[in-house]
Amino acid sequence: MFITTSRKPSSRTRTFCQSLSRVLNATYINRGKMSFRDVLNKASESGFKKIAVISQIKGNPSRIEIYDTNGQILLFLKITMALLDSKGKINPDKLCIKCEIDDLNKAFIDILDIPKCHHDSNRNVMWVKEGDLENKALIEFYDKDGLIRDPKIYVKNWRFE
């Protein structure tokens, strides 16, 4: 996956993108003055099939929009996030997904190309949990030892296109 930001990202948004790229085995590119068309072309030329654009409100990441290389939006997530300063190692090649929300389960597996978790204790986990009153879902990343790692993503809403 190719990860970039909206224009003029804050340092908090750039840090979030770097954390997300580490756990998802993605490539993060600072967008600079690239147009959206330039972003699509760069991702396609680099062999990526999915592009995540992280937008912000008041300097904080607020949306993740995932597109295909034709510019079709696949998934929209309205988010907030927390960085726990837990920058341990996650091997993204051994990442699997555990999802408690049926509506998101197949979408995350298909769009992010992450396999579903089975009872393999030597895996890193992207755990999508049921949310609370304010958030519909919570996404946490765990290393193979069960320790939580950055980033922690609170999903307020989502939609598929």
Image: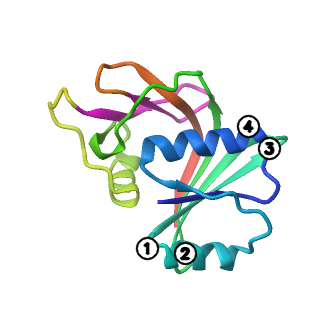
Disc with the residue nearer the chain's start (4 vs 1): 4
Q: Is residue 137 within the magenta segment?
A: yes
Whole-angstrom CA distance, mark 1 to mark 2, is 17 Å
Q: Is residue 111 depicted above or below 48 in this figure? A: above
Which of marks 2 and 1 precedes in the sequence? 1
Could you tell me the amino acid type at mark 1?
A: Gly
| Residue type indicated by callout 4 | Arg
Q: Quadrant of residue 92?
A: top left
Q: Which mark is residue 72?
A: 2
Dot 4 falls on a residue whose secondary structure is helix
- Mark 4–mark 1 Cα distance, whole angstroms, equals 28 Å
Confirm whether the magenta stretch covers residue 125.
yes
| Marks 3,4: beta carbons within 8 A | yes
Residue at the spot of label 1? 47
The secondary structure type at the circle numbered 1 is: loop
The residue that appears at 44% across and 71% down in the rendered structure is 49
Q: Residue at x 41, y 30 (%)?
A: 89
The mark nearer the N terminus, 3 or 1, is 3
**Which secondary structure, mark 2?**
loop
Q: Which mark is residue 10?
A: 3
Q: Give the farthest residue toward the left.
A: 119
**Which SS does the magenta portion mostly show?**
strand
In the rendered structure, which segment of residues is drawn in magenta?
A: 123-142
Neighbour class for label 4 at 10 Å: few (<14), some, many (≥20)? some
Disc 4 to disc 2: CB gap under 8 Å:
no
Amino acid carrying mark 2 in the image? Gln
Residue 59 rendering spot, x and y as whole percentages: 81, 41
Q: Which mark is residue 12?
A: 4
Instruction: Determine whether 21 is above or below 134 in the image.
Output: below
Reading the chain from its start, which is encountered first: label 2 or label 3?
3
